[in-house]
Image: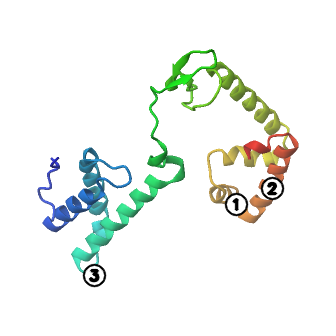
Amino acid sequence: MVSQNSYDGIDKYAADLIRHKARQLVGKAGFTEDDRPDLEQELMIDLLQRMRHFNPAKAKKTTFMARIVERHISTILEARFAQCRDWRLCQTSLNEPLDNGEGDTTERIDFLDSEGSLGGGTRETRERLAHEIRMDLGQAIASLPEELRDLCLRLHDSTMAEVAREMGIPRTTLYDRLSKLRDAFREAGLEDYL
C-alpha cells in the first residue's frame, strides 16, 4: 500500500526520512501496513513542531531531523509496549464464546460491565460489587481527619507535586500524610485499593 499523504512544501529529506521510518515500523510492535499513513502523519507533525528548535550552530539540519524522528519512534514504541496497553496482550476477540456458568455460551462482550471491564460473574454482580466498594471508600474518606480527607480528594485529580504546589507545603510533608492516609485505609479493610 502506497501512502496517500502529500508533503508539498515539506523538505524532501524530511518526507523521505519519515516515509522510510514508517515503512520500517510496519510489521513491528503490531503495526500493519494500514497504520503506515497514520505513523507518517504523526512523525511529520512532531518533526514540524520541533523544527523551530533547530540550531544550525549545533548540528546539520538532516542530523537534527533524523534524531527528532528516531526519538519520536522510540516514544511511540515505548507507549506501545507499556504494560497497560501492550499490543501483544490484546489478542482476544470480543465475539469469542465463553461459558456463562449456566451450561450455555455467551460472547465475551456480554461479560463487560458498564465501565468496559471484563470479569467473572454477571454484570449485575460486578456492578453491585463496584457499588459496594464505592460505598466503603466513601465511608472511609468521610471518617478521615480534615487534612487527610483534603489530601485524598486532591490526589484524585492531581499528582503529589501539583498538590504540594497548590497547598504550598513540601512534598515530604505530603508523603507523611499519604502514609497516614494509607494506614487509615488499611484499618478500614481497604488495603486492596491502595
Determine whether 66 is above or below 120 in the image.
below
Q: CA distance from mark 2 to mark 3?
A: 48 Å
**The residue tagged with tag 2: helix, strand or loop?**
helix
Q: Residue furthest front?
A: 103
Task: Give the number of the mark in front: 1 or 3.
Answer: 3
In the image: residue 9, left or right of residue 45: left
Q: Which residue in the structure is indicated by mark 3? A: 59
In the image: residue 153, left or right of residue 88: right
Residue 101 screen position, x and y as percent = 64, 19
Q: Quadrant of residue 67?
A: bottom left
Q: Amino acid at mark 3?
A: Ala
**Dot placed on the residue nearer the N-terminal end, 1 or 3:** 3
Q: Residue furthest left?
A: 8
Rendered image: mark on residue 135: none
Q: Which residue in the structure is indicated by mark 2? A: 179
CB atoms of marks 1 and 3 within 8 Å: no
Answer few, some or many: residues within 10 Å of disc 3's Cα (few below 14, many 20 plus, some between 14 and 19): few
Residue 5 screen position, x and y as percent = 17, 49
